[in-house]
Image (spheres, rainbow, N blue to C red):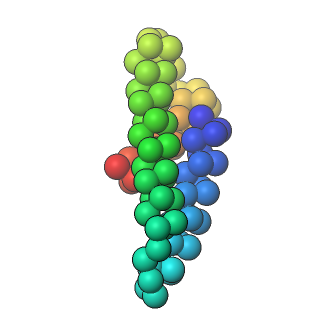
Amino acid sequence: MDYAVKYYNTTIKQLDDIYIDLQYEVKEHHIKRLENIASVAHDINKRIGIIWHQKYEDKEYETLAFRKWKEFITIRETWL
């Protein structure tokens, strides 16, 4: 989960940079960066679903781990 949070924080910075660049021109590296962002985000989303449904059968809704998980899911849903 820490990887995913760091990835999404980095992605926000990358998207800000790309947005600024796109005001002036579109280059191939912009497209490749966006495709990579989408691909990694898709993989993270799949792994989250697998972990959630297979490893957390008895979800402990009031634990710190669950609250962190829920916070992450909320952030992730804004990207979908």
Residue positioned 49% across, 51% down in the render: 36
All told, the count of numbered labels is: 0
Name the one closer to the observer, 29 or 9.
29
Relative to the observer, which residue lies in front, 15 or 39? 39
The answer to whether 58 is drawn above or below residue 51 in the figure is above
Q: How far from the left and from the top, in percent, is residue 11?
A: 55, 57
Left or right of residue 3: residue 52: left
Quarter location, residue 14: bottom right
Can I make out residue 74 in this image?
no
The answer, for residue 30, to whether it is visible in the render is: yes
- Give me the residue at 61% from left, 57% from top: 10
Q: Is residue 75 above or below residue 3?
A: below
Query: In the rendered image, which quarter is residue 26 located in?
Result: bottom left
Residue occupying the far front of the picture: 28
**Which residue is depicted at the point 51% across and 66% down?**
29
Compared with residue 38, is residue 24 higher up or lower down, i.e. above or below?
A: below
- Please name whichever residue, 15 or 25, is drawn nearer the observer in this view of the structure: 25
Residue at the outermost bottom position: 24
Q: Is residue 11 left or right of residue 48?
A: right
Q: Residue at x 57, y 41 (%)?
A: 4
Residue with the most extreme left position: 80
Where residue 58 sits: x, y (%)?
46, 12
- Image coordinates of residue 37 in percent, x first then y, are 48, 52
Instruction: Give 53 or 67, whichever is nearer the viewer.
Output: 53
Q: Quadrant of the N terminus?
A: top right
